[in-house]
Amino acid sequence: MRPKQQGKSGEQDLFRSRLDQIINMKHELVRLVARIDWAWIDGEIAPLYSEKGRPGIETRFVIGLLLLKHIYALSDEGVCERWVCDPYFQYFTGEEFFQHDFPHERSDLSHWRKRLGDKLELLLAESLRVAHETGALRGKDLARVNVDTTVQPKNVTFPTDAKLLHAAIVGLNRMAQKHGIRLRQSYLRLAKRAAMMAGRYAHAKQFKRHHRQLRFLRTRLGRLIRDIGRKIKGIPELEAALAAPLSRAMQIRSQRQRQRGWKLYSFHAPEVECIGKGKAQAPYEFGVKVSVVTTNARAPGGQFVLHAKSLPGNPYDGHTLAGVLEQTQALTGREIERAFVDKGYRGHQASNPRRVFISGQKRGVFGIIKRQLKRRSAIEPAIGHMKSEGHLGRCYLKGRHGDAANAILTAVGYNFRRVLAWLRMLLRLLLSVLLANLQVQTTLKPAS
């Protein structure tokens, strides 16, 4: 059932403290609360609920927690723990009195992320609206954009043959134990030692011994696959439940390090892709490609992210440009006059190719366009801040839907950090002006 609306009583409580009496009402988080249109967000999310059942958690509470998590780069557990001891967090989520216990479960955040799905772009649109309302972003800043792609790494270890084989053995044992399958032998102790010794032999460049340990792991994994296959044969429920783990285990057992084509890089996260970036410190990154669109000119509040989207399958950058520009225009409501990209977008399929300028391009680049093209690299610091201060540097969410949600919410958190910095700066300017006026009045001599 649709969540109930949070109401304000405005009354005192003998045993509880009102939040508006113990916090600074000029704090940037308090001022940001007044700018966000919570009623509009609640109305857009309402169709996701049925008319029956128990009322859900208040929309402002969960959406506020998601925003706070990505503004301050906290985990689900971290934002719930800080909510208990931070009155500003409680006020941001709509509480009227200070609470000493967290009223819900941490897992509610995971359920809400899955439920929102494509609706998460509403939060990105709301962040841009708030930035425009506060003066941090101007309408003309939306006409010229920078577009680039980066890699959102997954929370997986660096894949090696020994690690993958050991992970497959451990994963199959876990699934067998979960479904009550009694194995002839688990190989857990032997596989752990073989994986450890394989790493030591590779480090010492003793590759014959290293390959011997790999053959040992592959043999034990094959025995485990065949043992489970015999035990579940003729039981449709178990065959359906173990089809995916067995398929992944057989893929890991059969693949080789230097083979071409699709490979599996993680047993628990099969969606992970190997993306070559050509960097000296990290030639390959394991995760998903993400497209990011920012403003070209520096807005009064800084660079803002206009669009962010995960691109599973590692597509060519130029083939994604047309869709990204269309979605950005639909999100901002402003037609893009010029788009500036790097050389990875050569051969793009944009609907208006004359409005797309590639780094290093000479034809048609003169005057103001030449100066704007020099600001194409301004998107790189924005991506760096999203990785270092947000969650784009490591995705801890599960599946492809987790990759998509993490990319959008990281962009939302980045935009709201820029808005908070803008509100903080405006407050400092106002206080400095008031202080200067007070000093001028005190220096005036009284009339004789």
Image (cartoon, grey):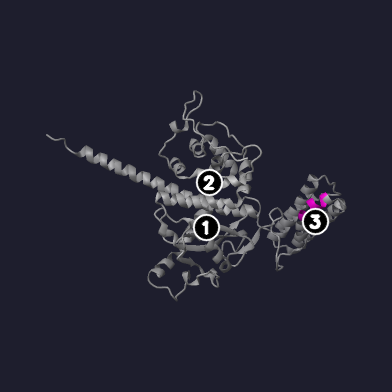
Badge 2 marks a residue whose secondary structure is: helix
Residue drawn at (42%, 57%) of the image: 139
| Nearest-to-viewer mark from 1 and 3 | 1
Quick one: 156 or 206, which is closer to the camera? Answer: 156
Q: Where, by quadrant of the figure, is residue 138 drawn?
A: bottom left
Residue that mark 1 sits on:
307
**Three-letter residue code for mark 2:** Ile
Is residue 206 found left or right of 322 in the rendered image? right
39 above or below 215?
A: above
Residue neighbourhood size for the residue with mark 3, other residues' Cα within 10 Å, grouped as few (<14), some (14–19), many (≥20): many
Using the numbered discs, state the Cα–Cα distance from disc 2 to disc 3 in whole angstroms: 50 Å
The quadrant of the image that shows the N terminus is: top right
Identify residue for label 3.
221
Q: Is residue 294 magenta?
A: no
Asked if residue 391 shows in the view, the reply is no
Span shown in magenta: 237-245
Q: Distance between the residues labelled 1 and 3?
A: 44 Å
Q: Establish if 3 lies above or below 376.
A: above
Mark 3: which amino acid? Leu
Q: Does residue 240 belong to the magenta stretch?
A: yes
In the rendered structure, are the residues bearing label 2 and label 3 in contact, judged by CB atoms less than 8 Å apart? Answer: no
Q: Distance between the residues labelled 1 and 2?
A: 18 Å
Question: Tag 1: residue type?
Answer: His
Mark 1: few, some, or many residues within 10 Å (few <14, many ≥20)? many
Q: Residue 178 carries which label?
A: none
Viewer-proximal residue among 73 and 355: 355
Q: Where is residue 40 in the image (x, y as percent from the top left)?
A: 51, 46
> Label 2: which residue?
41
